[in-house]
Image: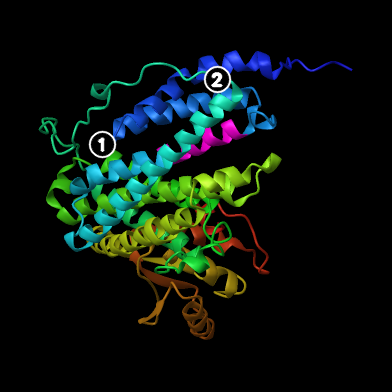
Amino acid sequence: MKGSLTEVITEEEFLPLAQEHSRNFLKIYNYLHAQNKHLPRRFYAHLIEESEELESFLDDHCARDNKAWYFFGELVACIRNLSKVAFILKHILYRYPAYELYEDEAEGFLRKTKNVSTFIDKTILSFYQEIGRESKRLGMTMPKGTLKDDFFREIYPQKRLPYTIDGEEDFDAQKVAAGIGTQYLRVIEKWEYFEWGFGKVKLDDLKDMIPDSVNEERSREVITLIHNLQSTYDHYIKHTPLESQDEGLKRFRGYISLPLHLLNVINWLSHLYQRHIHTAGRHGRRKEVSHIINGTRILDIVVNYALLYTNRYLQTGKGLADDILGRYIKVGTCEVKVPEGLGFHLRPATLVARIAAYYGTKLHLIVDGQEYDASSILSITMAAGLIARKGHKTVAFMGDERALRDLRRLSEFNYGEDERGNRTALPPDLSHLWT
């Protein structure tokens, strides 16, 4: 049997390595203790870089599998998480005016954001104080010197260069705008599926929500959806003639960005709570972390700040998305065949309704001049009775041309079943109907 290729070193041999790799991280300790003023984004960008590098070094050496070094690794990991949140909050405060959101939402949100930012700043300082004590216990020497203030001088976003690049051609910008509106409604659908549309929650009820209802896994799902949405907007819509002509479309960008930032706050603080506070740490170290950080306050920030305001901004954004769809979708009609065999029974009706739900626009099934809501399975099956009695072989649909395109494809594959009603495969371009 072959031996392990990894060399096991003693704690005494590890100490000088840790001392060397912690030097820049520990200099931040000196800087924080000398500061009595506002810390800008660039400071937290630096802290993120240093904490990530040190955490990687500690993980490479399995420090959190060692009783002596476990707590030091936990402290570094917590500082990394908190620095991510601190940076996001500073970014929100700096960038908020550029989002051009409705002003009646501004005052309360900005005040709460500043309060949360101050709490996170103080918590990071508390963790660094513990880092100082733990470093001495491990036998590490605190480095001399500190960081220079000039290095963190902030460049304010209110100052910018003028636009001198011609706007992109908007040959398909209206089509993309409609697609973005649909994507936004899918975010809302996921949000509602998670049942995150609640108001303020009492502190006594918070522990029942995280991680059972609100957790980092779910937040990452929504983050991915919104991040893809923002990327699509920036690639196809930003700085186009269409954006410059449509103030509602331009404002909509803010209702994409701000929820995305707040969801990242939810993600990082959920991670912090789940991994370092809620779950009992190995070697009995949970107690030390819980003494440094107020777990209930973290829960309060996640639910009664980040989640609450994300929900508010998404609901406002939903109204803008509906307006965008109303302006930019192209409405048409198409004639398709009735499903062979059993007609519009449950499976075909479900797939048609899913097409309507996928695009978030109105879609109607027309039989003998009467309109049926194609987003409703019940409405479609009601129409199916009339279709069967009259012996119709084809029916008409009216609505979003994107939905009509999918209906044509669905009809080509007999609505996903054979003549006996058995399920059959759909083409890859209709895969969204099965998910």
Give the image location of residue 99, x and y in percent. Answer: 22, 49
Tell me where residue 157 appears, x and y as whole percent: 18, 37
Q: Position of residue 348 (x, y in %)?
A: 55, 69
Q: Is residue 96 visible?
A: yes
The local secondary structure at tag 2 comes to: loop
Residue at 55% in and 63% down: 415
> Which residue does the image show at 54% across and 82% down from the upper left?
388
Apparent side of residue 102 relative to residue 147 in the rendered image (left or right): left
Q: Quadrant of the C terminus?
A: bottom right
Quadrant the N terminus occupies: top right
Is label 1 in contact with label 2 (beta carbons under 8 Å)? Answer: no
Q: Which residue occupies the foreground of this view, 417 or 50?
A: 50
Range of magenta residues: 71-83
Alpha carbons under labels 1 and 2: distance apart: 28 Å
| Frontmost residue, 1 versus 429 | 1
> Which labelled disc corresponds to residue 37?
1
Vertically, is 154 above or below 369?
A: above
Residue 339 visible at all? no
Q: Which residue is mark 2?
A: 140
Question: Magenta part mainly helix, strand or loop?
Answer: helix
Quadrant position of residue 308: bottom left
Q: Nearer the viewer, residue 332 or 71?
A: 71
- Please name the amino acid that badge 1 sits on: Lys
Left or right: residue 72 compared with residue 6: left
Task: Rate crowding at label 1 as few (under 14), some (14 to 19) or many (20 or more) other CA atoms within 10 Å.
Answer: few
Residue depicted at x 45% and y 52%? 222
